[in-house]
Amino acid sequence: MKASVGALLRVGRAVPFLAGLVDTATRGAVVAVLSLAIGAGPAIAGAGGQGFSGPYDPTRWTTTLTGAQPGGGPPAGVDASGAPSTMTVVGGDGVLPGGTDCWDDTLANPRKGCAIFYTLTAVKAGTVRFDWVYESFDNSSSARYDIFGYIVNGAKTQLTADEGPVVQNGSISFAVLAGQSFGFWLDCGDCGYGNAQVTVRSFSAPIAEAAAVPVLGSVPLAALAALLALLAAIRLRRARQQ
């Protein structure tokens, strides 16, 4: 704010009407009026929160591979080259045919947790929203092996339908609290015979509001009128004293 007021005072010295008025006493009055005017102006809203940028830039996310064959083996990972518009979770496909590192049909729950998680911490309470497009390349032509969803503080929610088509899509929104971990997960099931990948777009998440930034251009007209009246009154008083 001091820089803005100083700039105005420098301009004032160059204008004949104001010349000579900006002495020590007048400066205090001018600053007082401008301080009130600037303080009444709107704040500049913080940018960010849309797409994978700012507090949700890809560099802030953590990729975690789980299971006996971490993430199901290559090519498990996250492709963030499309950020800030998109990012893609790529499932694993590294288990040899017949391998049981990630899937065992003899078990009641054959899935053994070979998955990839892409997570970070919410900077503020609010709503997370995104669109997703899933595609399975499994040679079974089924979506039941490679499943995708979102996770909040360790609680997983599946978004894909096991008996659905190999290409699926949707839009989702859910609430998070400040400090909670959230993100996406893709469990590759048998992690062989073809993988799946999911592209996430139109991502948005809550962001902390930026501190208020005074804007001289937003000074109310009433405050400017008061400033001009003050200067005129001082000029008139000095003219009478001469």
Image: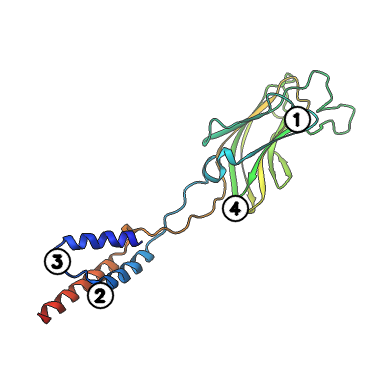
- Mark 4 and mark 3 lie on one chain; the one further toward the N terminus is 3
- Mark 2 and mark 1 lie on one chain; the one further toward the N terminus is 2
Measure the C-alpha gap from mark 4 to mark 1: 32 Å
Measure the C-alpha gap from mark 1 to mark 3: 77 Å
Image coords of residue 53 (percent x, y): 52, 41
Measure the C-alpha gap from mark 4 to mark 3: 53 Å
Residue 93 sits in quarter: top right
Q: Quadrant of the C terminus?
A: bottom left
Image coords of residue 35 (percent x, y): 34, 67
Point out the frontmost of discs 4 and 1. Answer: 1
SS state under label 4 = strand
- Mark 4 and mark 1 lie on one chain; the one further toward the N terminus is 1
Residue 73 sits in quarter: top right
Q: Amino acid at mark 3?
A: Phe
Closer to the camera in the image, 144 or 83: 83
Measure the C-alpha gap from mark 2 to mark 3: 17 Å
Which residue bears the numbered disc 3?
Answer: 17
- Mark 1 and mark 3 lie on one chain; the one further toward the N terminus is 3
- For residue 126, which numbered disc appears in the image? 4
SS state under label 3 = loop
User: Height in image: 194 above or below 26?
Assistant: above
Image coords of residue 88 (percent x, y): 60, 31
User: Height in image: 200 above or below 95?
Assistant: below
Which residue bears the numbered disc 1?
Answer: 70
Q: Amino acid at mark 2?
A: Ala
